[in-house]
């Protein structure tokens, strides 16, 4: 009968356990429903050659990363040196998605701005940023209005998608890539996908 | 009691301050100020949405019914940036984009379920303010009612058992009766009482 007195205590520890587990979760990281699904196709103008377009199909047959970036994104600055190092070591090809380069910048008003003018501005800003910080991308494409971002379920910058040879999204990394996440999460998955194909 | 001049002065000055702030607020809301703010949009700090901010959805659909539908849907969709707001309430740029998407798709003749499916495909169930009932959320939906039922069941069981116990205890033996009578008569001895609280366990 004595054990009865332990019941509230055990209930308390159970509840505390749940709450402690809750503290380890990051509510900002919303799991993507697109994992293992075909990546949404896109056709976007290239940053280096705006008169040419680039599509998902152009990367078919390769395991690659799609990195969502913008020159106004502070966290991108944090991960950028790592991307540059990855490019130097030729770890995995990275395609850049320049997300809402102009209209995403809160300091710029795009009201009354034509799409052509906005695109020209995005080209200028994007190129300048890559010239300043280094260009780790095999190619960058411009998502001027963020539509492709919505198709990929992007809700913040930076985000990085790992895409396999068949064009399926296999992993999504939310926030800046860190050396640790590269080593423990991304590269092992890249290797695995390369072996699988 | 004489009024404290210092105190009344401070009340006056705070009143003046309040009035001043009110006048300032009126000035700021006036079209004149809006016009000057437009002249220098770069002075608006980034991230603060004002009515003249390009980040706020400018296009209100021409059709008021469409706009009402859009708002109704938007209230059911969670903004992924400000997670405790719906995309109808949030002025985060993503919420504006998503509202535009909702409006555009409704205008294109899609029905509401299609639009919701479109967003769930991209952002997952998380985008729904009201989580759907499925294997992952079953416990969440059913849990409170299950707990309530379990509690009520346990209480009913306890009460019934207790009633049985009382009924059983209620049958007094002749010795009990004798002791009770002695206690009532004032001759009881607590030390010799076998039914003292400590000994009951």
Image (cartoon, rainbow, N blue to C red):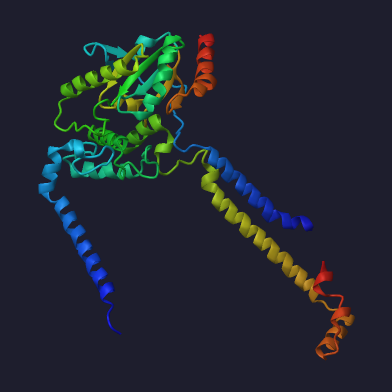
Q: Residue furthest front?
A: B6
Residue at point 40%, 10% (across, down): A60
Q: Is residue A39 visible?
A: no
Residue at point 70%, 63% (across, down): B158
Q: The N terminus of chain B appears in which quarter of the rendering?
A: bottom left
Q: Choose top left, top right, bottom left or bottom right for residue B185.
A: bottom right
Q: Is residue A63 visible?
A: yes
Q: Choose top left, top right, bottom left or bottom right for residue A6.
A: bottom right
Q: Choose top left, top right, bottom left or bottom right for residue A86.
A: top left
Q: The C terminus of chain B appears in which quarter of the rendering?
A: bottom right
Residue at point 75%, 68% (across, down): B164
A89 relative to B2 in the view: left or right: right
A182 relative to A136 in the view: left or right: right
Q: How many marks?
A: 0
Q: Is residue A173 above or below residue B134?
A: above
Residue at point 52%, 37% (across, down): A25
Q: Is residue B74 above or below residue A73?
A: below
On the image, the x and y values in percent for residue A94 come to 40, 15
On the image, the x and y values in percent for residue A8 come to 67, 55
Which of the two residues, A86 or A15, is positioned nearer the viewer here? A86
On the image, the x and y values in percent for residue A130 come to 31, 17
Which of the two residues, A195 or B171, is positioned nearer the viewer here? A195
Q: Residue furthest bottom?
A: B185
On the image, the x and y values in percent for residue B50 come to 22, 43
Q: Is residue B3 above or below residue B66?
A: below
């Amino acid at each position: 009968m004595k054990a009865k007195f332990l019941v509230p205590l055990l209930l308390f520890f159970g509840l505390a356990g749940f709450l402690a587990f809750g503290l380890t979760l990051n509510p900002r990281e919303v799991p993507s429903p697109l994992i293992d699904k075909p990546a949404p196709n896109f056709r976007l103008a290239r940053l280096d050659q705006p008169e040419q377009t680039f599509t998902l199909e152009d990367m078919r047959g390769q395991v690659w990363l799609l990195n969502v970036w913008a020159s106004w994104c502070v966290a991108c600055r944090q991960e950028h040196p790592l991307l540059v190092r990855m490019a130097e070591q030729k770890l995995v090809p990275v395609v850049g998605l320049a997300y809402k380069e102009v209209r995403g910048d809160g300091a710029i008003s795009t009201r009354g701005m034509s799409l052509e003018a906005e695109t020209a501005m995005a080209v200028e800003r994007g190129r300048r940023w890559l010239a300043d910080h280094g260009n780790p991308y095999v190619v960058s494409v411009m998502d001027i209005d963020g539509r492709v971002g919505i198709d990929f379920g992007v809700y913040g910058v930076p985000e990085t998608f790992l895409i396999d040879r068949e064009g399926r999204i296999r992993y999504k990394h939310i926030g800046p890539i860190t050396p640790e996440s590269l080593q423990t999460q991304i590269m092992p998955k890249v290797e695995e996908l390369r072996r699988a194909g | 009691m004489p009024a404290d001049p210092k105190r009344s002065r401070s009340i006056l000055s705070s009143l003046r301050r309040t009035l001043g702030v009110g006048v300032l607020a009126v000035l700021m809301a006036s079209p004149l100020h809006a016009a000057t703010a437009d002249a220098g949009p770069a002075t608006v700090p980034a991230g603060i949405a004002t009515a003249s901010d390009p980040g706020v959805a400018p296009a209100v659909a021409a059709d008021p019914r469409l706009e009402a539908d859009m708002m109704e849907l938007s209230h059911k969709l969670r903004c992924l940036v400000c997670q405790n707001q719906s995309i109808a309430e949030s002025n985060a740029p993503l919420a504006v984009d998503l509202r535009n998407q909702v409006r555009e798709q409704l205008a294109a003749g899609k029905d509401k379920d299609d639009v919701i499916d479109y967003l769930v495909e991209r952002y997952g169930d998380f985008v729904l303010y009201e989580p759907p009932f499925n294997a992952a959320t079953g416990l969440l939906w059913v849990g409170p009612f299950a707990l309530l039922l379990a509690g009520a069941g346990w209480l009913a069981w306890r009460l019934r058992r207790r009633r049985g116990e009382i009924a059983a205890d209620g049958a007094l033996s002749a010795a009990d009766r004798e002791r009770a009578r002695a206690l009532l008569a004032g001759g009881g001895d607590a030390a010799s009482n076998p039914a003292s609280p400590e000994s009951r366990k």
